[in-house]
Image (tube, rainbow, N blue to C red):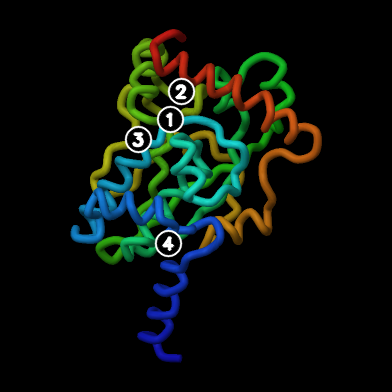
Amino acid sequence: MGMMGEAAQANSELLAETRLLDFSTATIQALIDRRAWRRQPPEAAAAEIYTFVRDEILFGYNSDDALPASQILADGYGQCNTKATLFMALLRAVGIPCRFHGFTIHKALQRGAVTGIFYHLAPNDILHSWVEVWLNGRWINLEGLILDRPYLRQLQHRFKDRSRNFCGYGAATANLCMPEIEWTGSDTYIQRDGINRDFGLYDTPDAFYAEVGTNVTGWRRWLYVHFVRHLMNSNVARIRNAAI
């Protein structure tokens, strides 16, 4: 296969629909039609999709990492891994190639959002990811969409005197007052400083979870799904509403 053929095949793989990237579902297609993302140039569409996932899909904890994009959209909230899945599905639906980069972060990044005994029960290393998007002939790392703007504003207000090298409440950044989260066509980050292991690149989140697994299993998973995440989401909502 020649270079042009290899490039076409790679591009096709990075636009494919999967069980998790289920962008042909009616709810995702209706959203794309309402926002007219298909009728925009790729960079403009990517910028709007990025902002949508960052701010209109609130920061919160879903029942699992390996959820399909349509379920994350229905939930209306997500964390790093689930927002990454939805972001990828929306990008691929409008013809923008993207891939998944898997990591772990230390649980200290979640301190404050997760409290008390549940923080101590959490695994030290938590699965993390960001999305890499092919635009204008280069790859762009996009991690800065995890925290919605209202939630981030409350953190910035509460910790304005301790914003340097901030780690906690779902953020790990050298400067909480001015994190690299705005769309400029370049990399964005909000949790990068908490990364402690790099799993590398995957074409899809499906492949990553099939190889690595998800964050919690067994009785911890049951406790998380049915109890802990609801407390975490209530805590995040209180923070967002300025009741830290």
User: How many labels were placed on the picture?
Assistant: 4
Q: CA distance from mark 1 to mark 4?
A: 35 Å
Q: Mark 4 or mark 3: which is in front? A: 4
Residue at the (44%, 43%) spot, across then down: 73
Q: Mark 2 or mark 4: which is in front? A: 4
In the image: residue 201, left or right of residue 212: left
User: Mark 2 or mark 4, which has the lower sequence index?
Assistant: 4
Q: Where does residue 37 sit, x and y in percent of width and height?
A: 25, 55
Instruction: Identify the residue position indicated by label 4 in the image.
Output: 24
Mark identifier at residue 173: 1
Residue type indicated by callout 3 = Glu
**Do labels 1 and 4 touch, CB within 8 Å?**
no
Residue type indicated by callout 4 = Ser
212 over 113 or under it: above or below? below
Q: Residues within 10 Å of mark 3 (few under 14, many from 20)?
A: some
Residue at the (47%, 49%) spot, across then down: 70
Residue at the (59%, 58%) spot, across then down: 206
User: Judging from the image, what secondary structure is the residue with disc 1 in?
Assistant: strand
Instruction: Identify the residue position indicated by label 2 in the image.
Output: 166
Residue type indicated by callout 1 = Thr
**Do labels 1 and 3 touch, CB within 8 Å?**
no
**Foreground: 152 or 53?**
53
